[in-house]
Image (cartoon, rainbow, N blue to C red):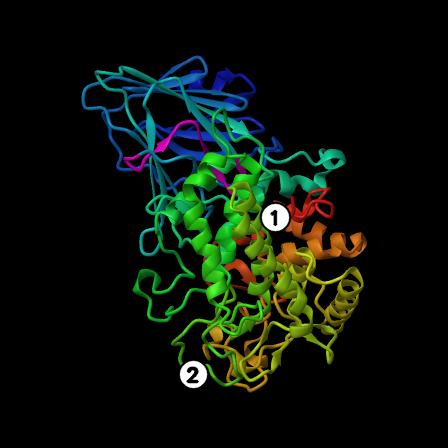
């Protein structure tokens, strides 16, 4: 095949380009370069919005060269022995024809550059059935379908010394001599009404799927495809799943959520559960673990109307709700963590984790954030009990919710600062570092009155101005002032620990005031509920721009990642992609103030 033929060939919606030993195709939606020595991509880039954002190649090198392959070009397609690829503006069609000894098509993606993930449902063999989505966070999505029966995709991911996300397309067999895979570029997001063509919402449209990353080895939604699952974040996935349009014919985000819930119902352990992976620093379940699971189950049942699933799994969901009650030995309605949360009770070396997601901050005893979730979870457990015909249970859980609401504000309100503290330790002290997410959750879930909420957020916004935080494209800090050494669970500066008593030398690093997209939802959502749209949008729009620019993914020059940053933008994260931050996109929904995700 001559270079002249390759160079001059035009393809529908795009153009072939010739490179030494390479063939390429590009449209507004996708860019590919094909290897000349094997049937595979050397470059694959996607832009779901069709704006030509195609600079990133997420592919790892395709594999060991094989000189036995001689590609042949026919029209807008290129054929190798056993495999053929055809391209159009928004589609790639891959066809496998039976050849004895043919190998599967293995696509290896580099998670250091982009945390690709395969979103779909597992079969018993651990493969992903079709249809499925191949999603590239901050870039775009392929919907993968096939007309062949019984075909499923291999899927694996790993981090550490060997970093990859791997998707395997089986080759045709003698029994099934032809298999066609269709990759269609799609953009999946809820209707945003008047914002549908607003470029400020590009990050919303491109990234609404980002929160869904499936760990293939555990078959569950996780921090990202090669990272840990966290039981205390399942309610974040469920909140987004309830607003997601269908992913494909016969596949929904609720199906993916149910798959994860089934794993937890079946007894799977995750981070936030006692002795996960044998970790001796986790002797207790986190206080936000079981509220999260109950809320997620409620989201699934109420959004899907799957009463059969509720009937089958009601005992397990009830057991989760009862674990919350078991954390209330004094009977006041509030859960209490076994660790006291007293200042100075955390040793110089990390030996026990505190009570919630913010696992380097010394939350203990009565935890304001976890109890806000428990309030929502108790009320929603009452709903599930009524749906299941369990009237006595419904009354019991509703009484728990009412009891939490009765004591919450007076337990955690700090008259010295005018905001809610993060936790009340066993010695009766309030630990208050102007936690944005705690106060946001209290408003979001209805634990304070409108007047109380506005008073609280007057103080928080004034404090934010006082400390000079205004780069909202970095996200938001969890706390606005340094956490004292006596209330932090590590001295290691890399994780926000400090040697100074006032915590100042660790401030802005990781959870000690570092900026992140994580939990930004609660601040923006609280401001919307309180009618403070101008304040909400001042935070939201810079964050949407950062989502569009991929500002919360990837690795910086210092080797750290951008899921956490100091206030000057220096990265201090480690996940590379932390899906929790993309819950913030819910607060961009035009009806978010009228329909908080926790209310039906």
Question: SS class of the residue under badge 1?
Answer: helix
| CB atoms of marks 2 and 1 within 8 Å | no
Relative vertical location of residue 88 with respect to residue 417 in this rendering, above or below: above
Kindly identify which residue carries mark 1.
547
Q: Tag 1 or tag 2, which sits nearer the N-term? A: 2
Q: Residue at x 43, y 54 (%)?
A: 319
Q: Which residues are magenta?
A: 124-140
The secondary element bearing badge 2 is classed as loop
The residue wearing badge 2 is 347
> Left or right: 288 with respect to 415?
left
Asked whether, in this view, residue 203 is left or right of residue 453, the answer is: left
Residue 128 magenta = yes
Tell which residue pokes out farthest to the left in this image: 101
The N terminus is located in which quarter? Answer: top left
Q: Residue at x 45, y 50 (%)?
A: 317
Q: Nearer the viewer, residue 52 or 345?
A: 345
Looking at the image, which is closer to me, 440 or 266? Answer: 266
Residue 167 screen position, x and y as percent? 36, 36
Q: Which mark is residue 20?
A: none
Residue 66 shows in this picture:
yes
- Residue 540 counted in the magenta span: no
Q: CA distance from mark 2 to mark 1?
A: 38 Å
């Amino acid at each position: 095949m001559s270079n002249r033929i390759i160079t001059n060939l035009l393809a529908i919606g795009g153009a072939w380009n010739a490179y030494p030993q390479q063939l390429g195709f590009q449209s507004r939606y996708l860019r590919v370069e094909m290897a000349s020595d094997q049937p595979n991509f050397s470059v694959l880039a996607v832009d779901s919005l069709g704006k030509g954002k195609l600079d990133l190649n997420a592919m790892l090198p395709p594999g060991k060269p094989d000189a036995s392959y001689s590609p042949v070009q026919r029209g807008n397609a290129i054929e190798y022995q056993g495999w053929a690829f055809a391209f159009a503006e928004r589609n790639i069609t891959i066809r496998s024809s039976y050849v004895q000894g043919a190998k599967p098509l293995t696509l290896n993606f580099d998670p250091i550059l982009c945390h690709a993930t395969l979103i779909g449902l597992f079969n018993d063999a651990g493969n992903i059935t079709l249809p499925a989505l191949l999603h590239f966070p901050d870039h775009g999505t392929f919907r993968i379908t096939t007309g062949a029966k019984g075909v499923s995709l291999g899927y694996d991911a790993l981090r550490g010394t060997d970093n990859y996300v791997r998707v395997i397309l089986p080759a045709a067999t003698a029994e099934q001599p032809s298999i066609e895979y269709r990759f269609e570029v799609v953009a999946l997001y809820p209707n945003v009404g008047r914002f549908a063509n607003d470029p400020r919402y590009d990050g919303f449209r491109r990234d609404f799927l980002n929160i869904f990353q499936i760990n293939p080895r555990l078959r569950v939604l996780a921090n990202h495809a090669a990272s840990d699952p966290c039981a205390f974040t399942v309610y974040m996935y469920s909140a987004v799943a309830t607003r997601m349009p269908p992913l494909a014919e016969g596949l929904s985000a609720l199906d993916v959520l149910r798959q994860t819930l089934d794993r937890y119902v079946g007894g799977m352990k995750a981070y936030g559960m006692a002795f996960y992976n044998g970790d001796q620093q986790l002797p207790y379940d986190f206080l936000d673990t079981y509220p999260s699971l109950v809320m997620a189950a409620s989201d699934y049942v109420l959004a899907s109307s799957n009463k059969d699933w509720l009937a089958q799994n009601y005992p397990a969901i009830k057991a989760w709700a009862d674990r919350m009650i078991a954390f209330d030995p004094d009977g006041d309605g509030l859960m209490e963590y076994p660790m006291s949360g007293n200042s100075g009770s955390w040793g110089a070396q990390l030996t026990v984790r505190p009570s919630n997601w913010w696992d380097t901050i010394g939350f203990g005893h009565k935890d304001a954030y976890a109890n806000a979730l428990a309030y929502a979870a108790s009320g929603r457990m009452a709903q599930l009990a009524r749906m299941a015909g369990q009237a006595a249970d419904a009354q019991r859980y509703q009484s728990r919710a009412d009891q939490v609401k009765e004591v919450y504000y007076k337990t955690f309100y700090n008259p010295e600062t005018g905001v809610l503290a993060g936790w009340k330790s066993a010695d009766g002290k309030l630990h208050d570092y102007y936690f944005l997410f705690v106060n946001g959750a209290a408003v979001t879930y209805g634990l304070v009155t409108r007047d109380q909420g506005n008073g609280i957020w007057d103080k928080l916004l004034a404090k934010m101005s006082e400390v000079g935080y205004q780069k909202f494209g970095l996200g938001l800090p969890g706390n606005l002032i340094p956490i004292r050494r006596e209330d932090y669970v590590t001295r290691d500066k890399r994780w926000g620990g400090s040697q100074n008593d006032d915590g100042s030398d660790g401030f802005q690093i990781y959870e000690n005031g570092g900026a992140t997209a994580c939990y930004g939802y609660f601040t923006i959502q609280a401001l919307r509920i309180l009618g403070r749209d101008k304040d909400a949008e001042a935070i939201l729009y810079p964050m949407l721009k950062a989502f569009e620019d991929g500002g919360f993914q990837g690795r910086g020059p210092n080797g750290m990642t951008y899921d956490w940053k100091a206030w000057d933008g220096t990265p201090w994260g480690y996940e590379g992609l932390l899906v929790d931050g993309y819950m913030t996109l819910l607060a961009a929904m035009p009806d978010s103030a009228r329909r908080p995700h926790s209310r039906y």
